[in-house]
């Protein structure tokens, strides 16, 4: 959960460093796309980590008979 946040912060720091080192249009576009594409991935990792922390994955069904309808 926290690893996703740390990884995204490192990505943003790298993005700003690379853009400041070479502030051309192609560099800005390239690193901006990296940051935007990785954001939903980081959010998904945060959600997965939170659910794992809560214990939602402690018991997974082995067969389809164990699945209950939750309405």
Image: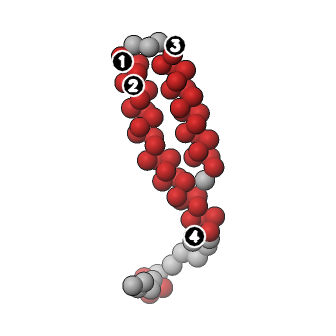
Identify the disc placed on residue 57: 4
Quarter in which the C terminus is drawn = bottom left
Q: Earlier in the sequence, mark 4 or mark 2?
A: 2
Name the residue carrying label 2: 30
Q: CA distance from mark 4 to mark 2?
A: 37 Å
For numbered disc 4, what is the local secondary structure?
loop
| Residue 19 percent coordinates (x, y) | 48, 19
Name the residue carrying label 1: 26
For numbered disc 1, what is the local secondary structure?
helix
Is the Cβ of the residue at disc 1 closer than 8 Å to that at disc 3?
Answer: no
Q: CA distance from mark 3 to mark 2?
A: 14 Å
Residue plotted at (54% across, 75% down): 60
Q: CA distance from mark 2 to mark 1?
A: 6 Å
Q: Earlier in the sequence, mark 4 or mark 3?
A: 3
Residue plotted at (46% across, 47% down): 41
Q: CA distance from mark 1 to mark 3?
A: 13 Å
Is the Cβ of the residue at disc 2 closer than 8 Å to that at disc 1?
Answer: yes
Name the residue carrying label 3: 21
For numbered disc 2, what is the local secondary structure?
helix
Which label lies toward us, 4 or 3? Answer: 3
Judged left or right of residue 30, residue 44 is: right
Q: Earlier in the sequence, mark 1 or mark 4?
A: 1
Is the Cβ of the residue at disc 4 closer than 8 Å to that at disc 2?
Answer: no
Q: Earlier in the sequence, mark 1 or mark 3?
A: 3
Is the Cβ of the residue at disc 1 closer than 8 Å to that at disc 4?
Answer: no
| Residue 29 percent coordinates (x, y) | 37, 24
Q: Earlier in the sequence, mark 3 or mark 2?
A: 3
| In the image, residue 11 above or below residue 49 | above
Mark 2 burial class by Cα count in 10 Å: few <14, some 14-19, many 20+: few
Residue plotted at (39% across, 32% down): 33
């Amino acid at each position: 959960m926290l690893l996703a946040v740390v990884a995204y912060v490192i990505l943003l720091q790298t993005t700003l460093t690379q853009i400041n080192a070479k502030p051309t249009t192609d560099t800005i576009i390239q690193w901006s796309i990296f940051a935007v594409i990785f954001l939903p991935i980081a959010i998904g990792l945060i959600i997965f980590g939170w659910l794992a922390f809560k214990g939602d994955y402690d018991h997974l069904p082995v067969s389809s008979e164990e699945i209950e309808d939750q309405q």
